[in-house]
Amino acid sequence: MLITIVTPAYNESDNIPLMYDRIAAGLDSEDFSWEWIIVDDHSSDQTFKIAADLSENDDRVRAVRFSRNYGSHTALRCGFEAAYGDCVVGMAADLQDPPGLIPEMVEQWQGGAKVVWAEREVRLGEKGLPLVFSRLYYRIMRDMVGISQMPPEGADFFLIDRKVVDALNQFKERNVSIFALISWMGFSQTVIQYDKQARQHGKSGWSFEKKLKMAIDSMTSFSYKPIQLMTLIGMLLAAFSFVYLIVVLVNYFRGIAPQGWTSLMAAILLIGGLQIVMIGVLGEYIWRSLDESRQRPMYTIEDSTDIDKQGK
């Protein structure tokens, strides 16, 4: 039995050697084989060189370098397409997720689960607004978008069966959350909990801009409720405007002159602002349709240790 570990890496030169030691220490004594695919998301440090050096010394390690920064979700897709394992584990390179948890995930998989999520029960080193926004995102995805199988506290450390990998590789969407897509696909899913550790080295490349894009991608990829909300707002504004028109006409025939230049301007600005927001929401959907219609490669590879690919 072969387990493939896929790790997106961006400027993780200090963490990669430590992670290799932890994977080897945690899995070498198990009754299964493992391989590790490191996908360098065009780092500016020595991440790929270090990964390639590991590959030279251990043929269980393979490394790929993107020609530019495509994002961690695209890096996961690249690793899935290159994976040979009977199941695949996706985990980050920041040492916040313990490789020692993989045997427990494998046990759940052998028990019949096709998807095993490692849910973050405690998130050390994270607090304040980022934690609030994270919980809000998963609440929206579960309750509003309708992907109820997503773990309530979120998960980016997971195991998926070979059948899930093969099915996932059929999807060629570019602007989509890989975690939301796996949850949406169905299959039997289970959750185990663990304490997510604080980052030891380096700085996370998961910026607010990237988080915002993922949230928008998740909404537009799996729900048309924003468009429904726009329609509802338009109907309410139309109804309010009709009622207000009747009030103005009644007052006119009663000899009461229309009052309120300030209120009129406020109404114009409010309606104009709502219209701009609605156009922006429509633009998000239209842009993603255009992006998909181009059919450009999902990624291009600059260098690799032994994976002969030029783009998928």
Image (cartoon, rainbow, N blue to C red):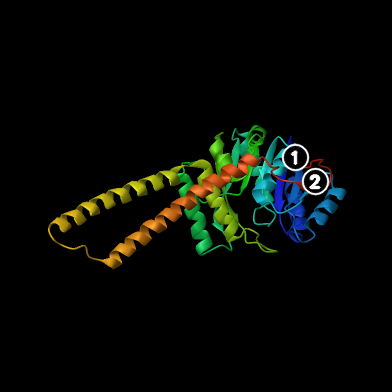
> Is the residue under label 2 in contact with that under label 1 (CB below 8 Å)?
yes
The tag on residue 62 is: 2
The kind of residue on which mark 2 rests is: Arg
In this view, 45 is above or below 280: below
Q: Helix or strand or loop: what does disc 2 sit on?
A: strand
Left or right position of 135 against 53: left
Left or right position of 242 against 51: left
The x, y position of residue 299, in whole percent, is 71, 45
Front residue of 7/233: it is: 233
The x, y position of residue 213, in whole percent, is 57, 53
In this view, 204 is above or below 32: below
The x, y position of residue 159, in whole percent, is 64, 42
Front residue of 232/157: it is: 232
In this view, 29 is above or below 244: above
User: Quarter of the image containing the N terminus?
Assistant: top right
The residue drawn where x is 33% and y is 46% is 235
In this view, 199 is above or below 300: below
- Of the numbered discs 1 and 2, the one sitting upstream in the chain is 2
* Residue 152 visible in this rendered orientation of the protein: no
Q: Helix or strand or loop: what does disc 1 sit on?
A: helix
The kind of residue on which mark 1 rests is: Ala
The residue drawn where x is 44% and y is 47% is 226
Q: Which residue is mark 1?
A: 82
Number of residue marks: 2
